[in-house]
Image (cartoon, rainbow, N blue to C red):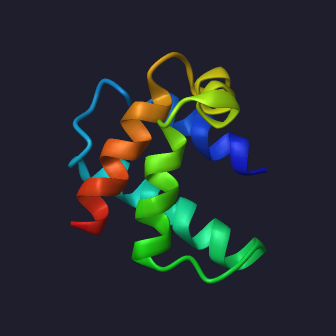
Amino acid sequence: NMMFLFTEFGHMTEKEPEDETVQAQVKKLQDYITDNFYTCTNEILESLGAMYNGGGSMTENIDRAGGKGTADFVAEAIKVYCG
Protein backbone atom coordinates (compact mmCIF):
# COMPACT_ATOMS: atom_id res chain seq x y z
CA ASN A 1 0.00 0.00 0.00
CA MET A 2 1.42 3.34 -1.10
CA MET A 3 0.13 5.19 1.97
CA PHE A 4 2.37 2.99 4.13
CA LEU A 5 5.36 4.61 2.40
CA PHE A 6 4.09 8.01 3.56
CA THR A 7 3.59 6.68 7.08
CA GLU A 8 7.27 5.66 7.02
CA PHE A 9 8.22 9.14 5.77
CA GLY A 10 6.30 10.55 8.74
CA HIS A 11 8.64 8.67 11.09
CA MET A 12 11.64 10.31 9.39
CA THR A 13 10.66 13.98 9.63
CA GLU A 14 13.21 14.63 12.38
CA LYS A 15 15.93 13.81 9.84
CA GLU A 16 17.16 16.12 7.09
CA PRO A 17 15.66 15.53 3.61
CA GLU A 18 19.26 14.83 2.43
CA ASP A 19 19.69 11.98 4.93
CA GLU A 20 20.51 8.71 3.15
CA THR A 21 17.63 6.91 4.92
CA VAL A 22 15.19 9.52 3.64
CA GLN A 23 16.68 9.37 0.16
CA ALA A 24 16.39 5.56 0.18
CA GLN A 25 12.70 6.01 1.04
CA VAL A 26 12.26 8.34 -1.95
CA LYS A 27 13.82 5.64 -4.14
CA LYS A 28 11.40 3.11 -2.62
CA LEU A 29 8.49 5.42 -3.48
CA GLN A 30 9.73 5.85 -7.06
CA ASP A 31 10.15 2.07 -7.45
CA TYR A 32 6.68 1.43 -6.00
CA ILE A 33 5.09 3.81 -8.52
CA THR A 34 7.08 2.23 -11.37
CA ASP A 35 6.21 -1.32 -10.30
CA ASN A 36 2.50 -0.64 -9.78
CA PHE A 37 1.45 2.23 -12.06
CA TYR A 38 3.82 3.61 -14.72
CA THR A 39 7.52 4.30 -15.26
CA CYS A 40 8.27 7.00 -12.72
CA THR A 41 11.14 9.03 -14.13
CA ASN A 42 12.84 11.68 -12.00
CA GLU A 43 10.88 14.37 -13.89
CA ILE A 44 7.58 12.66 -13.09
CA LEU A 45 8.67 12.13 -9.49
CA GLU A 46 9.54 15.82 -9.18
CA SER A 47 6.08 16.78 -10.49
CA LEU A 48 4.45 14.40 -8.03
CA GLY A 49 6.45 15.98 -5.21
CA ALA A 50 5.09 19.39 -6.17
CA MET A 51 1.56 17.96 -6.13
CA TYR A 52 2.10 16.27 -2.77
CA ASN A 53 2.49 19.57 -0.94
CA GLY A 54 0.33 21.63 -3.28
CA GLY A 55 -2.66 21.56 -0.96
CA GLY A 56 -5.99 19.82 -1.32
CA SER A 57 -6.87 16.20 -0.75
CA MET A 58 -3.49 14.78 -1.80
CA THR A 59 -1.66 16.84 0.83
CA GLU A 60 -4.33 16.04 3.44
CA ASN A 61 -4.12 12.29 2.76
CA ILE A 62 -0.31 12.24 2.96
CA ASP A 63 -0.37 14.26 6.19
CA ARG A 64 -3.06 11.94 7.56
CA ALA A 65 -0.81 8.94 6.83
CA GLY A 66 2.43 10.42 8.15
CA GLY A 67 1.45 13.32 10.39
CA LYS A 68 1.24 17.05 9.82
CA GLY A 69 4.03 18.31 7.58
CA THR A 70 4.78 14.94 5.95
CA ALA A 71 3.70 16.12 2.49
CA ASP A 72 6.08 19.11 2.70
CA PHE A 73 8.88 16.84 3.95
CA VAL A 74 8.37 14.32 1.13
CA ALA A 75 8.26 17.10 -1.48
CA GLU A 76 11.56 18.50 -0.15
CA ALA A 77 13.17 15.04 -0.06
CA ILE A 78 12.08 14.42 -3.66
CA LYS A 79 13.64 17.76 -4.73
CA VAL A 80 16.93 16.68 -3.16
CA TYR A 81 16.71 13.22 -4.75
CA CYS A 82 16.06 14.61 -8.22
CA GLY A 83 18.75 17.24 -7.69
Query: Where, by quadrant of the figure, is residue 13 drawn?
Result: top left
Up the image or down, 32 lies above or below 22; here it is: below
Q: Position of residue 9 (x, y in %)?
A: 49, 38
How many marks on residues? 0
Residue 35 left/right relative to 49: right
Q: Nearer the viewer, residue 46 or 20?
A: 46
User: Which residue is at 63% across, 29% downward?
Assistant: 56
Up the image or down, 72 lies above or below 63; here it is: below
Q: Nearer the viewer, residue 30 or 60?
A: 60
Residue 56 left/right relative to 24: right
Up the image or down, 8 lies above or below 37; here it is: above
User: Which residue is at 47% across, 36% downward?
Assistant: 53
Query: Where, by quadrant of the figure, is residue 12 drawn?
Result: top left
Up the image or down, 48 lies above or below 71; here it is: below
Residue 48 left/right relative to 72: right
User: Which residue is at 77% across, 72% downward?
Assistant: 36
Which quarter of the rendered picture does the C terminus lie within?
bottom left
User: Which residue is at 44% across, 49% downward?
Assistant: 50
